[in-house]
């Protein structure tokens, strides 16, 4: 089996009804992201931050995987698939994918403010003031906020360097450092980019552009992959 590495972004989740802040001019459901998704916001108003993520979690709880998620899960029958996602939802897991690197954290997990190694699953959608870790410290969303380091970046880079096929689905390729992964894909490796609004990408050897939504685009990509590489 060949190593297939997939970078996914908000475009794939959008087809399951989860909105992206970029579509709303820097707003997420009416919230200014700088007031709910930064360490400074947490220090200033943790109640508002928790409220924001509770609402996102409640919405994501009901969201279902779409055709793109399902197709990526099906590809595990033919390739060793690693999904590197910029999304914090759990739609890849719901669809059945088994090897997922969450670059920007996970919406359904919380972590200790005192010890970042203490990470807990959130049962349901609520995380509130007074919810504490085993050391008695307040729990915060297990999310990489604007201005924070991306701890899983090194893991994602190692996977990218081993790729024998590289696939980009539903990302504008403007959010760094994630967007920079494409530049580390070995030049001889075939690269597929699926997006209805094709990112402004430089021409690369073995690069295929599929200007489609994630769901329909992935059906086409799966057909090509099985014909050429499985």
Image: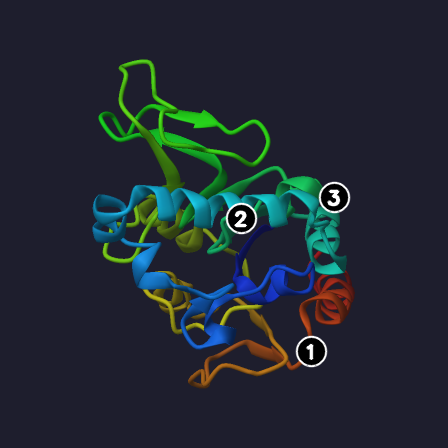
Of the numbered discs in the image, which one, if any, rests on residue 77?
A: 3
For residue 181, what is the image quadrant? bottom left
In-image side of 214 versus 123 (left or right): right
Instruction: Give the image location of residue 229, x and y in percent.
Output: 69, 60
| SS for callout 2 | helix
Instruction: Give the image location of residue 32, x and y in percent.
Output: 37, 65
User: Residue 38, relative to residue 174: is it above or below?
Assistant: above
Q: Earlier in the sequence, mark 1 or mark 2?
A: 2
Q: Earlier in the sequence, mark 1 or mark 3?
A: 3
User: Residue 48, relative to residue 113: is it above or below?
Assistant: below
Residue 80 seen in this snapshot = no
In-image side of 104 versus 124 (left or right): left
| SS for callout 1 | loop
Quadrant where the N terminus sits is top right
Residue 48 seen in this snapshot = yes
The residue identified by callout 1 is 212
Residue ID at (69%, 78%): 212
Contact, mark 1 vs mark 3 (Cβ under 8 Å)? no
| SS for callout 3 | helix
In-image side of 230 versus 60 (left or right): right
Residue ID at (74%, 62%): 222
Q: Nearer the viewer, residue 224 or 142?
A: 142
Q: Nearer the viewer, mark 1 or mark 2?
A: 2
Residue furthest top in the image: 134
Q: How is the image coloured?
A: rainbow
The residue identified by callout 2 is 55
């Amino acid at each position: 089996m060949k190593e297939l590495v997939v970078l996914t972004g908000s475009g794939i989740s959008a087809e399951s009804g989860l909105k992206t802040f970029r579509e709303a001019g820097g707003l997420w459901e009416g919230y200014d992201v700088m007031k709910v998704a930064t360490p400074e916001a947490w220090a200033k108003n943790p109640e508002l931050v928790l409220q924001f993520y509770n609402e996102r979690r409640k919405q994501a709880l009901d969201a279902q995987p779409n055709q793109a998620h399902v197709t990526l899960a099906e590809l595990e029958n033919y390739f060793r698939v690693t999904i590197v996602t910029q999304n914090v939802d759990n739609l890849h897991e719901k669809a059945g994918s088994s090897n997922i690197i969450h670059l920007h954290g996970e919406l359904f997990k919380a972590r200790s403010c005192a010890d970042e190694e203490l990470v807990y699953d959130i049962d349901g959608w609520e995380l509130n003031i007074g919810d504490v870790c085993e050391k008695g410290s307040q729990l915060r969303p297990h999310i990489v906020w604007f201005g924070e380091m991306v701890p899983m970046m090194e893991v994602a880079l190692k996977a990218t360097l081993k790729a024998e096929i590289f696939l980009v689905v539903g990302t504008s390729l403007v959010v760094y450092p994630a967007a920079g992964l494409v530049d580390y894909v070995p030049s001889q490796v075939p690269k597929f980019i699926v997006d209805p609004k094709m990112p402004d990408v430089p021409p690369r050897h073995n690069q295929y552009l599929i200007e489609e939504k994630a769901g329909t685009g992935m059906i086409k990509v799966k057909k090509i992959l099985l014909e050429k590489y499985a």
